[in-house]
Amino acid sequence: MEKAKAKALALFSGGLDSSLAIKLIQEQGIAVEAITFLTPFYSARAGGFSLERAAQQLGVPLKIVRLGLDYLRVIRKPKYGYGRHMNPCI
């Protein structure tokens, strides 16, 4: 039976840290895919910056997930916030 090739999912901002992390993983022969979460607070579009172009230069497929109204609802009224319920992190 053939061994499956290792894969990695990178949280990608397009910045130096995430770009270098992707390059280091690729150099180990691991296939990398990148994912970015765009929120109302972070759009990654400032100054003509392109996440797509940065991912293309690294040679990785990029999935962009846009978090909108549902994300804002959780921020404004968190289900487990303000001590109303048992903390799920315990």
Image: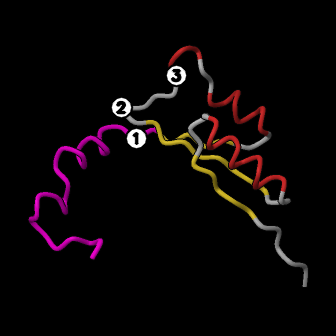
Nearest the eye: 75 or 47: 47
User: Where residue 40 is drawn, which disc sits there?
Assistant: 2
Residue placed under numbered mark 1 in the picture: 67
Q: CA distance from mark 3 to mark 1?
A: 15 Å
Q: Residues within 10 Å of mark 3 (few under 14, many from 20)?
A: few
Residue drawn at x 76%, y 51% as measured from the top left: 24
Tag 1 secondary structure: loop
Q: Residue furthest bottom?
A: 1
Which amino acid, by three-letter code, is at mark 3? Answer: Arg
Residue drawn at x 69%, y 59% as measured from the top left: 8
Which quarter of the image is occupied by the N terminus?
A: bottom right
Residue 81's quadrant in the figure?
bottom left
Residue drawn at x 74%, y 62% as measured from the top left: 7
Which amino acid, by three-letter code, is at mark 2? Answer: Pro
Q: Are marks 2 and 3 in contact (CB under 8 Å)?
A: no
Q: Earlier in the sequence, mark 1 or mark 2?
A: 2
Tag 3 secondary structure: loop
Left or right side of 77 for 48: right
Residue drawn at x 78%, y 56% as measured from the top left: 31
Q: CA distance from mark 1 to mark 2?
A: 7 Å
Residue placed under numbered mark 3 in the picture: 45
Q: Are marks 1 and 2 in contact (CB under 8 Å)?
A: yes
Q: CA distance from mark 2 to mark 3?
A: 12 Å
Which amino acid, by three-letter code, is at mark 1? Answer: Leu
Where 45 falls versus 60 (above or below)?
Answer: above
Q: Is residue 83 magenta?
A: yes
Nearest the eye: 69 or 37: 37
Magenta stretch bounds: 66-90
**Whole-percent x and y of residue 41?**
36, 31
Where 37 falls versus 2 (above or below)?
Answer: above
- Name the main secondary structure of what is drawn in magenta: loop
Tag 2 secondary structure: loop
